Image (cartoon, grey):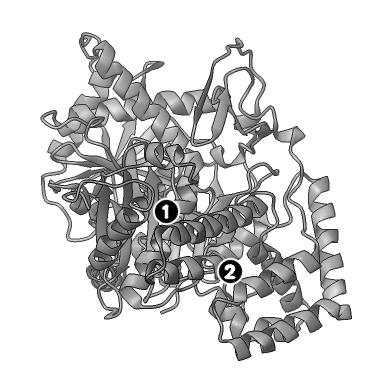
Amino acid sequence: YQRRVRGLHFSLMLGVSSRLSVYSFPSLFLKSFHYQSRTRVFKRNHLKRTFTNKTYDNQSKLPPLPVPPLNLTLEKYIKTLKPVLEPEDWNRSKTIVEEFGKSPIAEKLQKKLQQRADEKTKVNESWLEEWWLQYAYHIWKEPLPIHSNFWLHFDRDIVKEGISWAVNGSRVIHKILEVKKMLENQEIPLEYMKDKPLCMNQYLPIFSCTRIPGEERDHLDIRTPQPHLVVISNKQFYELKLEHEGHELSVHELQLQLMAISTASQNSPPAYSPGIFTSWFRDKYAKVQQQLIQNPVNKETIEKIRSSAFVVCLDSEEPSDIQSASLRCAAGDASNRWFDKIFQLIIFKNGRIGANVEHSPFDAPAFCTIIQKALAMVRDQYQKGFPILEAPRDLPVPSKLSWDLSPEVTQAAQIAEKDFQTLVSDVDLHVVHFDLFGSRFLKKKKLSPDGFVQMALQLAYYKVHGKGCPTYESAQTRQFLHGRTSTVRSFSEESVAFVKGMSSDIDKNAKIGLLQNAIQSHRDYLLDCTNGKDVDRHLLGLRILAMQEGLDLPIFQDKAFAASSRYLLSTSNVPAFDFTGGFGNMYPEGYGIPYAIREDNIITNIVSRVSCPETSSKRFGEAFEKSLKEMAALFEPFPIDKL
């Protein structure tokens, strides 16, 4: 049942072909245009965005992703093994790693990796990007929902209660389309981490991409998006054209078209739609899709989906709270979804809105920045007041897209639906909305908000399970050309010392010292990762080269390699924007925990498996809140009722 682990753990990978997929983007987004320069700067989440240049102007200035010195990687790797292993096992693994570092084969593999990096730099690519896309995502056969796709749920002060789903939905869609146009015109501002420009490459596929299933591995279909959306309502598919007689649809016209689709779809809904296959195992789905596209009717509908800007899902459910809404954004009714599409906007009957996002071509910060920009426009419109609605034009009714399903395909849909229900019933999702403090308090106490939360997660895991575990936190490497992420190993000797100290009778100052040491260690590792010097990606490259050479090296066969990268805590510090989000756990006995540290609160979606008797998302969430309070109380007394 092992799922993909973002390319870091390869016990399922040894038989996979080393042939690499091509990953390129259409030239549409790089076209030249006349742009009136504006200047405005704001800071959020340490990113500085400057409105002075075109979106991709800094691409030619970005350095390539480096290959770290082998000796430094191995030294750090040995250190990260210490909290995972018993002393005797650690000494044995240390010897294995040191012997590898001195071996001719290590020197050969390091040299080959550097040669690959040099060759990729010449064609403006990263040595890692094709491997990452393949081994972190596209070779894995597990279903996309929960396992790979991430999801968002928009705050209710943006999509207002008491306003109809069609009004909320049309307003959000309209603003997203405005941001899409800004992206095509290269008006999305350049981003910086302090004074270092960041790669903007991940913005390219947001409105142009669909993941295609393959029996061996998936690939991406990237094309110029056409001026239409595909709307799925009551398991039926419709084309919503975004232009009429050369002019874009207004907000009111979008609203009326959505309502027309919703009304039309109430008649004779099918038991299943081919959308169910996008939730299935990828190799099984690939075989069914080959049958589907042999029929011209089905092929035309699939082409409409792939060429659309994004998919809109109109759901009949009315989730009453953030937790039930998040679960439906994560999965929902698979016959009312198309999980292959990079971006699905989900509109519920009670006006709540969220998204489901295919993860492979980009990471959350790029997509979240686009969505936040659209939601900020909606918020601004509420403050200024929405314009008086103009009389709509006489628009054609949105056309229904047809399917022609054979008995064999229909039978496969029944099996896929059963498998999907098994998957969804095993999701244990719990949302924590911690209101006692946020980044404002932590910065006032001169504490790294991210480091503080990471140590709270370590303490929470210890409270629930009585031990620590390897922990994955994603860090950006976007200061390099086509950089994606690296792995912060948050489970460290320093975090173990802190957790044990918090559970002991040592005085408050001693506990503060242990916490500060753990946060500093985490911060140092995070800095190395953002500078392209993490352990996991480097070892990934060396292992792939070893596989291509047919080598079974002791460093990768050692049980410490698998144990240290079995990340039972998969975490990510997500942007503190006007939505919350989630992703699945890497392993059945683990947790998926994205967290947003806002100024005065901390929000997280905790995901684990119902079928695992060792885990409980609610119990972990309660332990996490308790840990945050205990740690904060070291620095400032809080009213007893809050603690």
Q: Secondary structure at mark 1?
A: helix
Q: What is the number of the mark on residue 468?
A: none
Residue depicted at 51% across the width and 63% down the height: 472
Task: Look at the picture and state if 494 lies above or below 183.
Answer: below
Q: Considering depth in this image, is 402 or 467 the residue closer to the camera?
A: 467
Q: Secondary structure at mark 2?
A: loop
Q: Is residue 220 visible?
A: yes
Task: Look at the picture and state if 218 lies above or below 598.
Answer: below
Residue 158 image point, x, y percent: 26, 30
Residue 285 location, quadrant: bottom left
Residue at image mark 2 = 8
Determine whether, in the image, residue 275 is placed left or right of residue 210: left
Residue 38 image point, x, y percent: 58, 11
Task: Look at the picture and state if 225 lies above or below 250.
Answer: below
Task: Look at the picture and state if 106 lies above or below 267.
Answer: below
Count of marks overlaid on the render: 2
Which label's residue is closer to the chain start, 1 or 2? 2
Of tags 1 and 2, which is closer to the observer?
1
Residue depicted at 57% across the width and 42% down the height: 202
Residue at image mark 1 = 453
Determine whether, in the image, residue 27 is placed left or right of residue 47: right
Residue 53 image point, x, y percent: 64, 20
Residue 491 image point, x, y percent: 52, 67
Disc 1/disc 2 C-alpha distance (Å):
23 Å
How packed mark 1 is, by other alpha carbons closer than 10 Å (few <14, some 14-19, many 20 or more), is many
> If the image is split into quadrants, where does the N terminus sit?
bottom left
Determine whether, in the image, residue 100 is placed left or right of residue 417: right
Residue type of the residue flagged with mark 2: Leu
